[in-house]
Amino acid sequence: MTAQSDGDTLARDIWTISRLNREVRAVLEGSFPLLWIRGELSNLSQPASGHLYFTLKDEAAQVRCAMFRPRQRLLAARPANGQQVLVRARVSLYDARGDFQLIVEHLEPAGEGLWRLELERLKQRLATEGLFDEAAKRPLPTFPRQVGLITSPSGAAVRDLLTVLARRWRALPVVIYPVAVQGETAAGEIAAALTLAGRRGDCDVLILARGGGAYEDLIAFNDERVVRAIRAVPLPVVTGIGHEVDITLADLAADRRAPTPSAAAELVSPSAEHLAQRLRALGNRLRTAV
């Protein structure tokens, strides 16, 4: 009985896990052509190797993806979590862990037309409510006591704002409300900062700003929560979003729109040089009159 069992064991084709995974990968890669696949990006990471790893998902399923560093040279912009993308990928298996995955050869934003259609619908709905009415726009103070900046504390926009404000009126106090200006939390943070600034009431005017970016970087500034927060705050709001091609819903809701953060700072701050010239001219007129 024992000898028969040993013989049966010797006759069996026993696979190792490594062999199984290699064979499964070969079957998968040989059975599917390069595919175009659409989905939402999540769990995006880029370790020291420089490769991109992320999850592509829809309403019912998800799949792990890898995009190796040489392929990233063709990317027009860095992808972000929550972005709808279209990928050209091949089906594969990661041998070491037995993970089913996609090897991405090409990645591009997807659904821009659909996104813009939804944006236009939201714009029309908010316009019907009067949130973009010119008659509701608030005037900017000529000599603000203090200016509030709602922007990223580490971006180029805040440096541009502070530089221009200091050059034009060095004694003007500034309060910075730090927020994320892109990403999943950005819209909520911006709306909360606007509400907080309105409740505190320590500023006479607010600047909502960020540097330039691709259309997907401006999602937070087209968010309904941000639009409503701009109109609800009891202070005039100037936008300086730095994206002259696309006018966001935040721009439409703001009391004034500037094409860049620097231009927004110019709008809200008096110019010490111009005031000095004006005072000299008035002094000359007064002496002449006397």
Image (spheres, grey):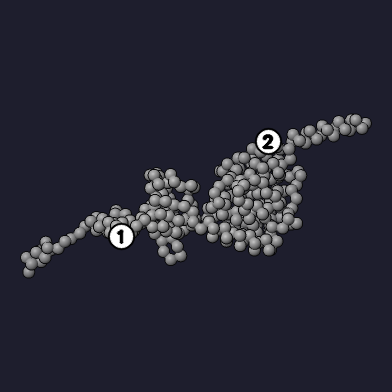
Image point 59% across, 59% down: which residue?
Answer: 119
Image point 42% across, 51% down: which residue?
Answer: 106
Disc 2 residue type (three-letter): Arg
Describe the element under mark 1 as helix, strand or loop.
Answer: helix
Q: Residues within 10 Å of mark 1 (few under 14, many from 20)?
A: few
In front: 128, or 173? Answer: 128
Residue 15: image location, x then y, percent:
20, 59
Q: CA distance from mark 1 to mark 2?
A: 65 Å
In front: 273, or 40? Answer: 40
Image point 64% across, 45% down: which residue?
Answer: 259
Residue that numbered label 1 is attached to: 31
Describe the element under mark 2 as helix, strand or loop.
Answer: helix
Q: Quadrant of the N terminus?
A: bottom left
Q: Is residue 36 left or right of residue 242?
A: left
Disc 1 residue type (three-letter): Ser
Q: Is residue 284 left or right of residue 38?
A: right
The residue lying furthest to the front in this view is: 33
Residue 75: image location, x then y, percent:
46, 47
Q: In this view of the protein, can residue 201 be seen by the observer? A: no
Q: Quadrant of the C terminus?
A: top right
Q: Nearer the viewer, mark 1 or mark 2?
A: 1
Q: Earlier in the sequence, mark 1 or mark 2?
A: 1
Q: Residues within 10 Å of mark 2 (few under 14, many from 20)?
A: some
Q: Is residue 266 above or below residue 23?
A: above
Q: Is residue 23 left or right of residue 64?
A: left
The residue lying furthest to the bottom in this view is: 1
Q: Quadrant of residue 154?
A: top right
Residue 220: image location, x then y, percent:
58, 54
Residue that numbered label 2 is attached to: 167
Q: In this view of the protein, can residue 56 be seen by the observer? A: yes
